[in-house]
Amino acid sequence: MLRVKRIKLADTAAGSGAIVKLPPSTSDAICAACATHLKGLAQIQDSVRAMTEQFTKNLEGLFSFADQLSLQLSSWFGVLDELRESICSNLASLMKQLAEKGASLD
């Protein structure tokens, strides 16, 4: 357990800008007290880093799948567009032929 030593400022040193000299063991005690907390913070940092990396990998996978799906749909829509153009370009002659066949049935 860390023992805290209280330091009293002399009445003459209590004014603004006073410099207090701490015993040499004070910095060692502060470092020892902080070491455990710093290790805990390092572990939290490592955990957050691991979660962030996994989240990034998941997003990359999702966007990769979306990109592949988009390319596939684009390919399919290209085929459908060609089919539509073919039907539309042949529709006039088809209607003309149907009209001629219909007229010949009279």
Image (tube, grey):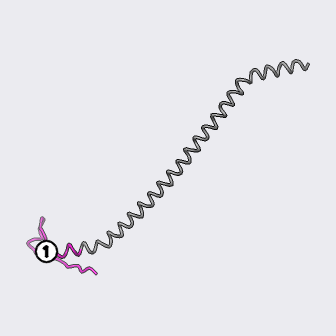
Q: Which secondary structure lies at badge 1?
A: loop
Image vertical order of residue 61 relative to residue 31, above or below: above
**In percent of the image, x 60 and y 41: which residue is there?**
72
Q: Is residue 102 left or right of residue 66?
A: right
Q: Nearer the viewer, residue 2 or 65?
A: 65
Image vertical order of residue 86 relative to residue 33, above or below: above
Q: Position of residue 85 (x, y in %)?
A: 67, 27
Q: Is residue 18 left or right of residue 60?
A: left
Image vertical order of residue 91 relative to residue 39, above or below: above
Determine which residue is flagged by label 1. 9
Q: Is residue 79 left or right of residue 38?
A: right
**In percent of the image, x 60 and y 38: which residue is there?**
74
Q: Is residue 3 magenta?
A: yes
Query: Which quadrant, please, contains the N terminus?
Result: bottom left
Magenta segment range? 1-29
**In percent of the image, x 50 and y 52: which residue is there?**
59
